Image: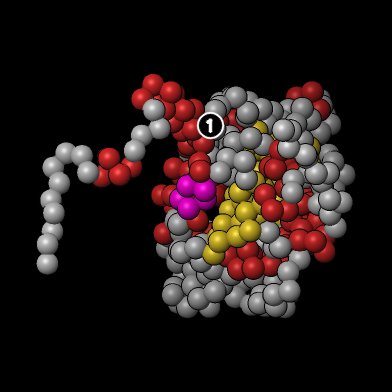
Amino acid sequence: MATETLPLPAYTKKDFQTDQEIRWCPGCGDYAILSAVQSVFTELGVRRENFVFISGIGCSSRFPYYMNTFGFHTIHGRAPAIATGLKISRPDLDVWVVTGDGDSLSIGGNHTIHMLRRNVGLKVLLFNNKIYGLTKGQYSPTSEIGKKTKSTPFGTTDRPFNPLSLAIGAEATFVARSVDVFQGHLKETLKKAAAHKGSAYIEILQNCNIFNDGAWFELTEKDARSEQVVQLEHGKPLIFGKNRDKGIRLNGLDLEVVQLGSGVTEKDLLVHDEQNPRPAYAFLIAKMGEMPGFPTPLGVLRSWGNYPRYEDLINNQIREVQEKRGKGDLAKLLRSGDTWEVRA
């Protein structure tokens, strides 16, 4: 007997909102990210009961309480591992991981890189505010050198992580960056990540207005935005500036900022290729924002879909073994080999 397929409900943003009190500080950038996700989920063509949010520890990790989907608030840094287990056992589910720069890049760093190298079909939202917010203002793995915080009163001497270069170094197949207050850009980036079949890693630059206010002011301030940001669009040259008169050119193995005109045209500029199979290209783009005089890249740095997903490989292997050896017997397995009977 054929199973009837029910039509997908016409979801609204309200369908993904919960009755839980949102416990973020007023003005926190997390509100904007939550709003963007709830809006985008109405357009993904996925049933609400097939979404799952997995989080670790931190302000960002309250996210599952505010999404009217399934969710699991786990332990510090372990969200990628738990989400991997879920995706292997239920590959039909749309599993999203919400984490912060502390949760993901310190105690959870090892889980993060292995999840990415395996290409597990998870969507990772990394909230990066360059501070520990939940524990009241200590420096994080993305805090800049010299940052004075409660845990570094004389300024941190640690060199910060670049989350995107870390993800690309692990050969993640989808890597992108957006900003909490750039709602249109953020929503489009979320849609692209949702459509990707393997691991999708999005760094979302997010403001903590209590402990690190203005962390990304040079990118979000209206008058400076056009000079400090380059929008990545596949197949288009890297152009930026208020008058769109600046560009990025490849000079040997290095990038350089050039002024258009005086013999320099758009044809001389680097054309963005997010589908480049070699991660070296995306890594070069990811490092741009750290270089003096260079803009910060926003958009999809890498989107390469020709690598198998971990959950597919695992489940195919299980099926092949079961076809040869049968499904097995757990009770028999536990009683095989050397066994002992313990009596009181």
User: Percent position (x, y) of residue 267?
Assistant: 79, 23
Q: Is residue 83 magenta?
A: yes
Query: In the image, what residue occupies the spot 69% across and 67% down?
Result: 66
Residue assigned mark 1:
312
Toward the front, the furthest residue is 1
Q: Is residue 209 visible?
A: no
Tell me where residue 269 sits by quadrant.
top right
User: Percent position (x, y) of residue 86?
Assistant: 52, 48
Q: Residues within 10 Å of mark 1 (few under 14, many from 20)?
A: some
Q: Is residue 312 magenta?
A: no
**Chief secondary structure of the magenta portion:** helix
Q: Quadrant of the C terminus?
A: bottom left
User: Percent position (x, y) of residue 183?
Assistant: 80, 56
How many numbered discs sit on the rendered protein? 1
**Which range of residues does the magenta coloring cover?**
81-87
Q: Nearer the viewer, residue 283 or 2?
A: 2
Query: In the image, what residue occupies the spot 44% across and 75% down?
Result: 151
325 shown above or below 243? above
Q: Nearer the viewer, residue 85 or 144?
A: 85
Query: In the image, what residue occupies the spot 73% across and 28% down?
Result: 271
Residue 110 in the figure: left or right of residue 299? left
Tell me where residue 90 sits by quadrant.
top right
Q: Quadrant of the N terminus?
A: top right
Query: In the image, what residue occupies the spot 66% across and 55% down?
Result: 204
133 shown above or below 87? below
User: Percent position (x, y) of residue 46?
Assistant: 74, 45
Tell me where residue 33 sits by quadrant.
bottom right
- Scheme by which the image is coloured: secondary structure
Q: Nearer the viewer, residue 314 or 218?
A: 314
Amino acid type assigned to the residue bearing label 1 in the image: Asp
Q: Is residue 69 visible?
A: yes
